[in-house]
Image (cartoon, grey):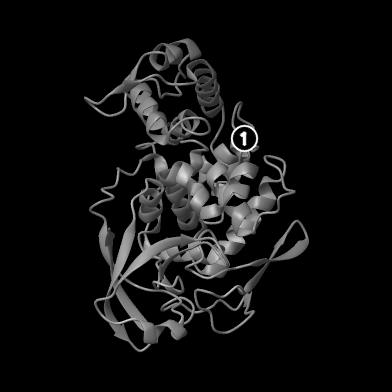
């Protein structure tokens, strides 16, 4: 454990997570911090790209075709990051829109 | 939806604005004290990768195992496991080395093993798991000496009962610094309030802004620990769980960790020596 132990720290941390099936990574998620101005632009069934943005803050966001972010993904973040680094792309299918809540299915393209 | 689903903003946070969405630049500020100084940093939002808010949310959503112990039954085992792990080698290799030493019957304090006996085990190829591939342990001579001396230390003294006393006591053992002493004490007692500031936590804390770039390890270990435990308290999670979450995720991500905390933090962490 580099670092140590990390924390090993972290404890328990001696164990190492297993590899990920990036192509098979698939999960439902409610988008976080939805931009209400984008809600009129999406419908159930829409397929939108997932991007890693670094401005104004680092976030995994679901974006409209014009690039405006709809909301952010906070589930399975580490898996998504590792797979994105391996050049796997992801998309989000809008499953449900209720009030300001947007539920999507995230899966590899 | 604004902010984080289902979570209340802690009172320690001063909201820069009430409503956050994914395009927002503004972020709530948090205040912590360390070394008599108060400083503010951006707490962030749960979706903002690498912020304190992000780590707290990840800690809540993914529950680390409650038992942090690496050894099986004794403090001596925990000491050996932590000494064989640590900086400069993957966690699985450290754990495999611990198993090899354990199976060789060399985790004992009456009498403690010689460094030569430990070297004999650690210089052999070590199976990562039963029947699995074998690897070479990177620091057989250095760690053999440390383990032998640490077990000698344990054999000559009464072990303090309290976690913090144990941590301080271990600092007198040859080859054990503040991070390793904290790691052992936290694992053994499962104590909250003891933080393990390793390279991953250091890197994450710098990026999140709750560690000062002017602090140095091991000199300022207590400042790092104080800041880290305050962040955990503000977030309403245990410092042990937060530490475990950060370590697991950063360790898992490896080079991809730069996508989470940014290249600047990665560069700063590169200069870390613990």
Q: Quadrant of the C terminus of chain B?
A: top right
Q: Residue furthest bottom?
A: A99
Q: Quarter of the image holding residue A52?
A: bottom left
Residue with the most extreme right position? B36
Seen in the picture, residue B154 relative to B267 is either above or below; the reply is above
A41 and A17: which is toward the camera: A41
- What residue would you read off at disc 1? B177
Image quarter of residue A105: bottom left
Residue at image location 57% in from the left, 84% down from the top: B18
Mark 1 residue element: loop
Q: Nearer the viewer, residue B26 or B186?
A: B26
Up the image or down, B9 lies above or below B133; here it is below
Tell me if I can see residue B69 in this picture.
Answer: no
Give how far across and how far down residue B92 sits, in percent: 37, 33
Residue drawn at x 38%, y 87% as measured from the top left: A40
- Vertical order, B140 against B68 (above or below): above
User: Where residue B72 sits in the image (x, y, percent)?
Assistant: 34, 37
Along the line of sight, which residue is nearer the eye, B178 or B31?
B31
* Residue B145 relative to residue B96: left or right: right
Q: Please give left or right for residue B62 compared with residue B53 in the image.
A: left
Q: Chain of mark 1?
A: B
Residue B200 on image: x %, y % = 53, 45
The answer to whether residue B2 of the structure is visible from this angle is yes
Note whether B151 is above or below A93 in the view shown. above
Q: Residue at x 43, y 73 (%)?
A: A66
Residue B42, percent across and down? 63, 67
Residue extending furthest toward the front = A66
Q: Pick the residue in front: B51 or B172.
A: B51
Q: Residues within 10 Å of mark 1 (few under 14, many from 20)?
A: some
In the rendered picture of this protein, how many numbered marks are placed on residues?
1
Q: Quadrant of the N terminus of chain B?
A: bottom left
């Amino acid at each position: 454990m580099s670092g140590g132990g990390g924390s090993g720290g972290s404890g328990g941390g001696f164990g190492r997570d297993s590899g990920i099936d990036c192509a098979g990574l698939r999960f439902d998620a409610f988008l976080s911090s939805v931009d209400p101005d984008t809600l009129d632009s999406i419908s159930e069934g829409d397929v939108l790209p997932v991007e890693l943005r670094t401005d104004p803050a680092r976030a995994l966001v679901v974006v409209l075709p014009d690039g405006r972010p709809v909301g952010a993904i906070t589930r399975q973040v580490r898996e998504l990051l590792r797979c994105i680094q391996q050049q796997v792309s992801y998309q989000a299918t809008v499953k449900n829109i209720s009030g300001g809540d947007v539920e999507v299915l995230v899966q590899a393209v | 939806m604004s902010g984080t689903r289902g979570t209340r903003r802690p009172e320690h946070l001063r909201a820069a604005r009430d409503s956050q969405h994914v395009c927002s630049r503004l972020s709530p500020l948090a205040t912590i004290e360390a070394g008599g100084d108060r400083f503010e940093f951006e707490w962030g939002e749960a979706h903002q990768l690498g912020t304190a808010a992000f780590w707290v949310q990840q800690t809540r959503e993914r529950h680390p195992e409650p038992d942090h112990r690496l050894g099986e039954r004794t403090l001596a085992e925990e000491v050996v496991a932590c000494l064989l792990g640590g900086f400069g080698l993957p966690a699985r290799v450290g754990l495999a080395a611990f198993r090899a030493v354990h199976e060789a019957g060399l985790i004992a304090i009456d009498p403690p093993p010689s460094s030569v006996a430990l070297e004999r085990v650690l210089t052999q190829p070590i199976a990562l798991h039963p029947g699995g591939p074998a690897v070479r342990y990177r620091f057989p001579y250095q760690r053999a000496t440390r383990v032998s001396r640490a077990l000698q230390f344990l054999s000559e003294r009464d072990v303090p009962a309290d976690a913090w006393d144990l941590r301080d006591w271990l600092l007198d053992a040859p080859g054990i610094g503040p991070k390793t002493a904290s790691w052992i004490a936290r694992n053994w007692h499962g104590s909250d309030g003891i933080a393990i500031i390793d390279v991953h936590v250091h890197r994450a804390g710098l990026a999140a802004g709750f560690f000062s770039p002017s602090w140095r390890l091991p000199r300022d270990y207590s400042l790092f620990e104080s800041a880290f435990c305050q962040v955990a308290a503000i977030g309403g999670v245990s410092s042990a769980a937060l530490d475990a979450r950060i370590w697991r995720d950063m360790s898992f991500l490896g080079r991809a960790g730069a996508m989470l905390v940014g290249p600047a933090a990665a560069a700063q962490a590169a200069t870390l020596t613990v």
